[in-house]
Image (tube, rainbow, N blue to C red):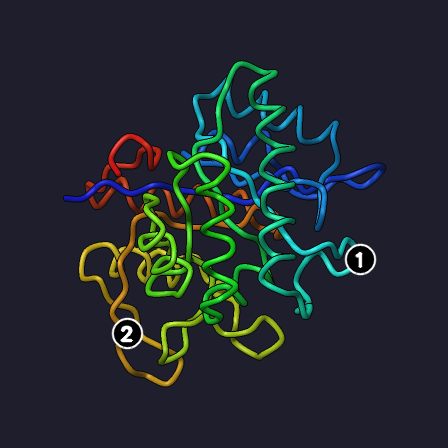
Amino acid sequence: MPSIDLNCDMGESFGAYTIGCDKEILDLITSANIACGFHAGDPAVMRKTVRMALEKGIGIGAHPGLPDLAGFGRRNMQISAQEAYDMTVYQIGALAAFAKAEGGTIQHVKPHGALYNMAAKDRELAQAIAKAVYDVDPEIILFGLAGSELVKAGTKTGLKTASEVFADRTYQRDGSLTPRREPGALIENRETAADQVIRMIKEGSVTSVQGEDVRVQADTICIHGDGQQALVFAKFIRQSLEHEGIKIEKISNFL
């Protein structure tokens, strides 16, 4: 049975606003994607989240997003490849500094929200992000949607890449995620989510909303920590994987 990494977006609080249940979620995951201040997060939250993750032996990941705090980085922006490169380098550098100050290093990079989805389909954008990661540190693992241009660009650039699948999102026939603005984009039933994840790991396949099977590679599973039932959902997904005998460990241990 293959190993699987469990990742979650975190460090998304900022200023007076608290988002998610990071401390509790850290007990359930193996890799943390930490917001770098553009779409969410701030210096104090970055430091605290890095420290908590390192204390629990969780892999540290930079989670760069578009500079859109009001839209939580989920609104598409027209950016050039150079802009994508620059903002990725900038945000990795910010989190890497906190990781170093706390005695750790960056394990991976996973773009956030709209930047992630744009890079999944836009080859030039994907190549710019992959080059940014490589230029900062060629040992960093690049997370991208399974089958996406971002994974292809990372491999071509010489990076280790992790193909990511989602527990709580539905898929389109082309392997992309159903846009959040569309009905049925989110899976709210935990049993359905667990069944989808287990099938992706064991069979390398997921059923699209059009009813067609889509081939996927699952190296790491994203579980979200900002929903109302996030903690309960995350616990159930982990327990379901363990019940199936699937080994859960951070990506750098087996990739």
Residue at coordinates 29% horizontally, 54% vertically from top-left?
218
Question: Which residue carries the number 2 mark?
Answer: 214
Q: Is residue 109 above or below residue 116?
A: above
Q: Which of the two residues, 168 or 131, is positioned nearer the viewer here? A: 131
Q: How many marks?
A: 2
Q: Name the residue nearer the viewer: 236 or 179.
A: 179
Q: Is residue 3 above or below residue 182?
A: above
Q: Residue at x 68, y 70 (%)?
A: 78
Q: Residue furthest right?
A: 16
Sort mark 2 into few (<14), some (14-19) or many (20+) by Cα contacts within 10 Å: some
Q: Secondary structure at mark 1?
A: loop
Is residue 108 rendered to the left or right of residue 197? right
Residue at 32 percent across and 43 percent down: it is: 160
Residue that numbered label 1 is attached to: 70
Percent of width and height locating residue 229:
57, 50
Q: Is residue 67 left or right of residue 234?
A: right
Give the Cα distance between marks 2 and 1.
34 Å
| Residue 91, quarter of the rendered image | top right
Residue sitting at x 71%, y 47%: 38
Report whether 161 appears left or right of 47.
left
**Mark 2 near mark 1, Cβ–Cβ under 8 Å?**
no
Residue 158, position as x, y percentages in the image: 32, 46
Q: Secondary structure at mark 2?
A: strand
Q: Percent x, y for residue 248?
A: 30, 36
The amino acid type found where label 1 is placed reads Ala
Mark 1 or mark 2, which is nearer the start of the sequence? Answer: 1
Q: Residues within 10 Å of mark 1 (few under 14, many from 20)?
A: few
Q: Amino acid at mark 2?
A: Val
- Residue 89's disc is none
Most foreground residue, 115 or 71: 115
Q: Is residue 128 above or below residue 51?
A: below
Quadrant of the drawing holding the C terminus: top left
